[in-house]
Image (cartoon, coloured by chain):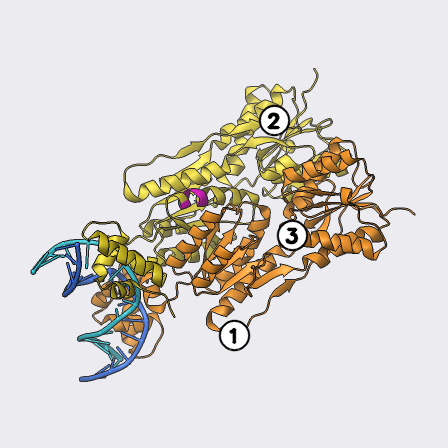
Chain colours: A orange, B yellow, C cyan, D blue
DNA sequence: ATGAAAGCGCTAACAC
DNA sequence: GTGTTAGCGCTTTCAT
């Protein structure tokens, strides 16, 4: 008892498949009576159209592919949530791919997605090298990037203004009276979240006449554990600081843990501001003040843009999502 | 310049499509010379087989569908990670569906998955009512459940022994000298994570000759905010307790926040043990002692089982995943 | 208002 | 070793 096909419906109704197809699509060209007979047969057989067969004809599969370096991170799953939501609203399914930051795997996925004839692909927070870019372009489907930049190409991107956001975070600390401000940065070779945020921090310092001190910077990889080590390193340096800007919430939480263990109170002894505004930031003790990135919204925007690109090949513009400062409890105003 | 088809390759090579298909599948029936010419043409045209066309013939799409009530939760994304990983290894893609705990949406997704001819579906942590179950069965593809039970059917399930795990958590508290143990439970109508865990807790109490006190139980919905309210309620009751078993880590973190605000120290004043072992549990201050559920592994198992079910219609057995206690820093041994 | 038939890109007999 | 052909389930002209 495999599934019923359009033929079965036609046979049971006593009409041709063409007519069945017509009522399926609400076209014209059949009597009310035929229509109801067909509908009844469909009901009776539990018929469901085969999207694969349709796809073969329409050259549209109504599915998009999404690549993440790490699906299980809170960061990725927020974005995914937004993408899934919007895609569903527009009648698209989404295939998730976990590249695990692995080059070969990424290429393999891109290949599979092409073979599966996806109608578009979204690449999130994963740097795009030449090979990917070539592969992406060869797929002949729209592509949008989230929190990444392509090498020397004009692929559409959705992201916040990282430099400005880092600037704002630092300026916020300064406006709260802090003058000795350390930073835990991401890898310098991460173009967006690494060096860009670092330069925003530096700029804010300099604009306020504060000196940028190399030794007040420690580097991590955005993850919790690296936040811990970076904080230890900062503490070991013995260069005093009253505030800390951390390039990711996860690292910030790590830093808070180390501070706690060292008997350093947040925010009494050191103020901290993070970046991302993940769910955990609300849950930490004390709740983390941070830069909000509208991740879910960014997923939505990317998805909407992608779908729009499918039928209008008109030009599209990069989207800069709005960041904001979420004031919670880890930054203290310094008395003069 | 749409994509090249097998015909194009055949034409360019000067052979028939059948031959091209043969080399594509490493079958026999062509000379070494033909083979290399075909391969060269493929390279030249950038030909990629069309999985849609293949699927139409093979009745296999090499994709599975996964339903979650909430993709963006840490819980779901861990499971998803395991599923995706294993599926990929076996050459399957995964379509994610975020049902948002919405009945109509779930049904809609099931329909879409059927139309897209997925080879199997996994439903995670979402209770299965009669309607879903009927829909699932009518799809004629294997189904496996994670952390759920079907109504009166024998669909395969992957889960931990919730009752035993709750029992173990409570017994652990007792073995640490606690005798007044409160609990924050999930909704009573959640068959697995709600009432079952509650009954495990109760059993452990009674087996140790401790009395079960109705007022020492507060209910939440497994989420952070509800953990906060539940904790407040418990505190308001003024019934003293030295330890607390919480049916989810998220609620446990919420409870810890409330305790902190109330000046109650963890674990000095109150010991807490959670359930799930999410990423955040390692990151909390202090790190949360909890029941570990091997979520990612459960995703892997589900996926493996599902794929196995596709070609062997042999019988399959439910999988009980191993839970364990992860001792971190929120439980204190009580002096006699 | 309705049917016949071609064809989407591919696989799998079956022929030679 | 290689080509021909008949579909897979559907949509879509083009007739009638």
Which quadrant of the view contains residue A111? bottom left
Earlier-in-chain disc, 1 versus 3: 3
**Which residue is under mark 3?**
A193
Nearest the camera: A308 or B229? A308
Residue A96 location, x and y as percent? 47, 52
Residue A314 image label? 1
Instruction: Answer whether labels 1 and 3 touch (C-beta < 8 Å).
Output: no
Residue B27 at least partly seen: yes
Residue B176 image label? none
Q: Marks 2/1: CA distance? A: 57 Å
Q: Marks 3/2: CA distance? A: 35 Å
Q: Which residue: 41% across, 56% down?
A: A113
Q: Which residue: 76% across, 33% down?
A: A236
**Which residue is under mark 2?**
B327
Q: Nearer the viewer, mark 2 or mark 1?
A: 1
Residue A326 at least partly seen: no
Q: Chain of mark 1?
A: A
Nearest the camera: A167 or A310? A167
Nearest the camera: B334 or A252? A252
Which quadrant of the view contains residue B258? top right
Q: Which portion, as a residue range, is magenta?
A: B84-88
Q: Marks 1/3: CA distance? A: 30 Å
Q: Is residue A120 above or below residue B160?
A: below
Residue B99 falls inside the magenta stretch: no
Residue B182 location, x and y as percent? 64, 30
Mark 1 on the same chain as mark 3: yes
């Amino acid at each position: 008892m495999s599934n019923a096909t359009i033929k079965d419906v036609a046979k049971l109704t006593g009409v041709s498949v063409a007519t069945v197809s017509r009522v399926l699509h609400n076209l014209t060209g059949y009597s009310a009576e035929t229509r109801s007979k067909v509908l009844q047969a469909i009901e009776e057989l539990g018929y469901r159209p085969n999207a694969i067969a349709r796809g073969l004809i329409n050259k549209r599969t109504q599915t998009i592919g999404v690549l993440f370096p790490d699906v299980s991170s809170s960061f990725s799953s927020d974005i995914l949530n937004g993408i899934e939501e919007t895609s569903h609203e527009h009648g698209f399914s989404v295939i998730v791919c976990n590249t695990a930051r692995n080059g070969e795997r990424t290429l393999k996925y891109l290949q599979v997605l092409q073979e599966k004839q996806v109608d578009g692909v979204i690449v999130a927070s994963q740097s795009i090298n030449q090979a990917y870019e070539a592969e992406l372009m060869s797929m002949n489907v729209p592509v949008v990037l989230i929190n990444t930049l392509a090498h020397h190409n004009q692929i559409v991107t959705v992201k916040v203004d990282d430099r400005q956001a880092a600037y704002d975070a630092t300026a916020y600390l300064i406006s709260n009276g802090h003058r000795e401000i350390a930073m835990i940065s991401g890898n310098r070779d991460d173009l967006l979240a690494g060096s860009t945020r670092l330069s925003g921090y530096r700029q804010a310092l300099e604009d306020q006449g504060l000196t940028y001190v190399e030794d007040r910077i420690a580097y991590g990889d955005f993850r919790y554990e690296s936040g811990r080590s970076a904080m230890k390193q900062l503490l070991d340096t013995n260069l005093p600081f009253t505030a800390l800007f951390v390039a990711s919430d996860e690292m910030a939480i790590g830093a808070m843990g180390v501070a706690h263990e060292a008997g350093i109170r947040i925010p009494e002894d050191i103020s901290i501001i993070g970046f991302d505004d993940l769910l955990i930031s609300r849950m930490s003790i004390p709740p983390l003040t941070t830069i909000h990135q509208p991740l879910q919204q960014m997923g939505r925007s990317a998805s909407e843009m992608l779908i729009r690109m499918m039928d209008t090949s008109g030009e599209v513009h990069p989207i800069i999502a709005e960041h904001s400062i979420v004031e919670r409890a880890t930054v203290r105003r310094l008395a003069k």
